[in-house]
Image: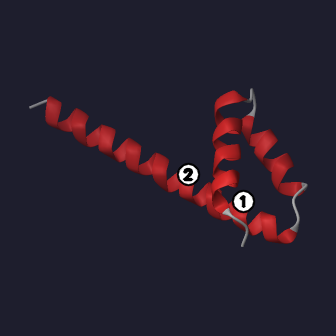
Amino acid sequence: MNNIIPVVTEIENILQGADHPEKTLYQRYCTSGAELRETFVLAMIGKLIEQNRRLQSGASRAHWMTY
């Protein structure tokens, strides 16, 4: 597995800067070699988990603010 940090950074840049990040991410995945594809998928899973935790944390704070 390649170093995951540069891939995560690239994914973050794509998510923040692309008009259609899903297309750009898919294109990046398709043009990668097999080993980089594995790293890319692992990095995407990590970003998804990170986003889910942020959303859950925000929902928990919003819930407590209603009391």
Dot 2 crowding, Cα within 10 Å, few <14, some 14–19, many 20+: some
Residue 40 numbered mark, or none: 1
Dot 1 crowding, Cα within 10 Å, few <14, some 14–19, many 20+: many
* Cα–Cα span, label 2 and label 1: 11 Å
Residue at the spot 59% in from the left edge and 59% down from the top edge: 45
Residue at the spot 54% in from the left edge and 52% down from the top edge: 48
The amino acid type, in three-letter code, at marker 1 is: Phe
> Do the residues under discs 2 and 1 have CB atoms within 8 angstroms?
no
Residue at the spot 79% in from the left edge and 64% down from the top edge: 37
Q: Is residue 66 above or below residue 37?
A: above
Measured as percent of width and height from the top left, residue 44 is found at 63, 55
The one nearer the camera, 32 or 27, is 32
Task: Classify mark 2: helix, strand or loop.
Answer: helix
Measured as percent of width and height from the top left, residue 36 is found at 79, 64
The amino acid type, in three-letter code, at marker 2 is: Lys
Q: Which residue is mark 2?
A: 47
Measured as percent of width and height from the top left, residue 62 is found at 24, 33
